[in-house]
Image (tube, helix red, strand yellow):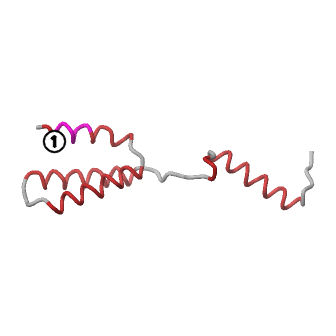
Amino acid sequence: MQSEVIMSKILTRKSEMNRKTLQLLLFHYQDMHEVLKPCAEKSRFEKLIKQTTEQLNKTPFDRVYPNGATALEYAKQLAKKANLKNNKGVICK
């Protein structure tokens, strides 16, 4: 009974999890699945592995930019470097 409560909490929180967390969760589900003998718990883990894999496929990849910059900030940095390189330090107004 307690394991069912824990599993339901995990399933409801999967939509909030990032890609790395889902990968780690899937890894541990697979580990536990390998150790179990054929029983109801093993089939439950098969279902969890399938659900986690589906959720993982839907989850976008995390983009990591230098210095914790957002995508827009990083794009501005790259554009500034490209402009300085192309204009050889001459800034047009």
The secondary structure making up most of the magenta span is helix
Relative to 35, is 17 on the left or the right?
right
What range of the chain is rendered magenta? Answer: 3-9
Farthest residue to the left: give it.
39
**Quarter placement of the N terminus:** top left
Relative to 64, is 75 on the left or the right?
right
Relative to 35, is 82 on the left or the right?
right
Residue 58 position within the rendered picture, expressed as x and y whole percent measured from the top left: 39, 50
Task: Judge whether 60 appears above or below 8 on screen.
Answer: below
Task: Judge whether 49 appears above or below 4 on screen.
Answer: below
Residue 66 position within the rendered picture, expressed as x and y whole percent measured from the top left: 63, 53
**Quarter placement of the C terminus:** top right
Residue 21 position within the rendered picture, expressed as x and y whole percent measured from the top left: 38, 49
Q: Amino acid at mark 1?
A: Ser
Between 93 and 78, the residue placed more toward the observer is: 78
Instruction: Name the residue located 46 percent from the left edge and 51 percent from the top edge.
Output: 60
Task: Judge whether 54 appears above or below 85 on screen.
Answer: above
Residue 82 position within the rendered picture, expressed as x and y whole percent measured from the top left: 79, 58
Q: Mark 1: few, some, or many residues within 10 Å (few <14, many ≥20)? A: few
State the SS at label 1: helix
Between 3 and 85, the residue placed more toward the observer is: 3
Q: Which residue carries the number 1 mark?
A: 3
Instruction: Name the residue located 15 percent from the left edge and 61 percent from the top edge.
Output: 35
Instruction: Name the residue located 84 percent from the left edge and 57 percent from the top edge.
Output: 84
